[in-house]
Amino acid sequence: MNLLHLKYAVEIAETGSINKAAEKLFVGQPNLSRAIKELEGSLGVTIFDRSAKGMLLTPDGEVFIRYAKSILKQVDAVEGLFKKGEPGKKTFSVSVPRACYVADAFARFSTTLNSEEELEIFYKETNAMRAIKNILQEGYKLGVIRYAEQYDKYYKDMMDEKGLHYELITEFCYVLVMNQESPLAEKPDLSYADLKDLIEIAHADPYVPSLPLSEVKKEELPDNTRQRIFVFERASQLELLAKNPSVFMWVSPVPDELLARYGLVQRRCQENRRVYKDVLIHRKEYHLSDLDNRFISELCEAKRRVFERE
């Protein structure tokens, strides 16, 4: 198996045709067909199903192409990094939970960037398992993962197995955030019963990888409301909270500045005692860059402002 064969397979997968791929690659169609057969023979799998409709990926082929794209992306990055005559471009990448204090840290980190430098910055909001996958397969350098304390051993065992370094950022219980015009906004401490007539906003992707989604909902989302809106990113949740007094959301503690900006209030629920952990992760062999350290410094400051204000 060689890099050229990987490029051939990726191009065929994207075009769905040997002929179209041959045209784009400036390679003869017989030579391209022979290369793919050699590749499949060396791997011992069938990558493509040949049919009248074109070249279709098999299940094994889908897995292979995903890895091939990742490998080729890393090769391009290495070539770009060491290309002679051009200054190296600095990169920073992090996958994080949808947390306001983390977003605040990232915004402050962005103000420290040097306008004279060539930079590429990647900030991905996602769940814990995708953050881990981003580091292991997608070339991300840092991650912040969130999980319930009861799954601490599961995650630590998995990270040890996959060669990831992990470091606790903070522990907390979720609080309730809602519009300042909410009927519950004046109550300092709330109960589950107070929430039954309001609409809950919840993130739609599951937290617990070892459980099916139905079990995750039962574990993570107490069934104390009759209506629920699922969202996938923070922007929609903030707009909903700012404009609808009938909605609420369970969140990690929110910076005062953000509460004021969107006209929100934050309240505790004494019945909610489940503890969550936010954990910084990266590969064990990875050496933190200057950009990494600056972001982590801002993250620690944001944690102090939000979690230690009480």
Image (tube, rainbow, N blue to C red):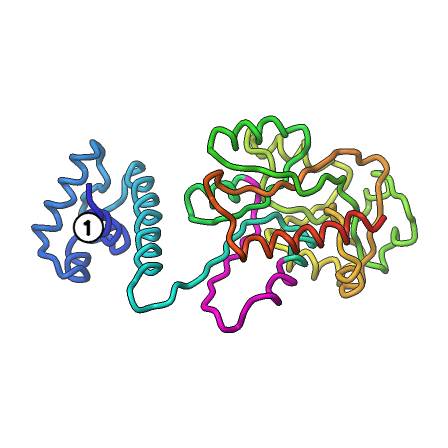
SS of the residue under disc 1: helix
Residue 109 image position (x, y, % from top left): 62, 61
Residue 75 in sight: yes
According to the picture, the residue beneath numbered tag 1 turns out to be: 4
| Residue 181 figure quarter | bottom right
Range of magenta residues: 106-128
Q: Residues within 10 Å of mark 1 (few under 14, many from 20)?
A: few
> How far across and how far down the image is residue 125, in percent?
57, 52
Q: How many marks?
A: 1
User: Closest to the observer: 77 or 284?
Assistant: 284
Q: Is residue 98 magenta?
A: no
Q: Amino acid at mark 1?
A: Leu
The image shows residue 63, relative to residue 117, as above or below, that is above
Does the magenta segment cover residue 119?
yes
Residue that appears at 30% across and 46% down:
68
Looking at the image, is 221 positioned above or below residue 13?
above
Q: In the rendering, at what x and y percent does residue 272 appear?
A: 80, 36
| Residue toward you, 245 or 70 | 70
Residue depicted at 77% across the width and 62% down the height: 257
Rendered location of residue 245, percent (x, y): 81, 58
Quadrant in the rendering for residue 274: top right
- Residue 200 horizontal side relative to residue 24, left or right: right
Residue 24 lies left or right of residue 220; in this view the side is left
Left or right: where does residue 116 sit relative to residue 55? right
Residue 248 visible within the image: no
Residue extending farthest to the bottom is 116
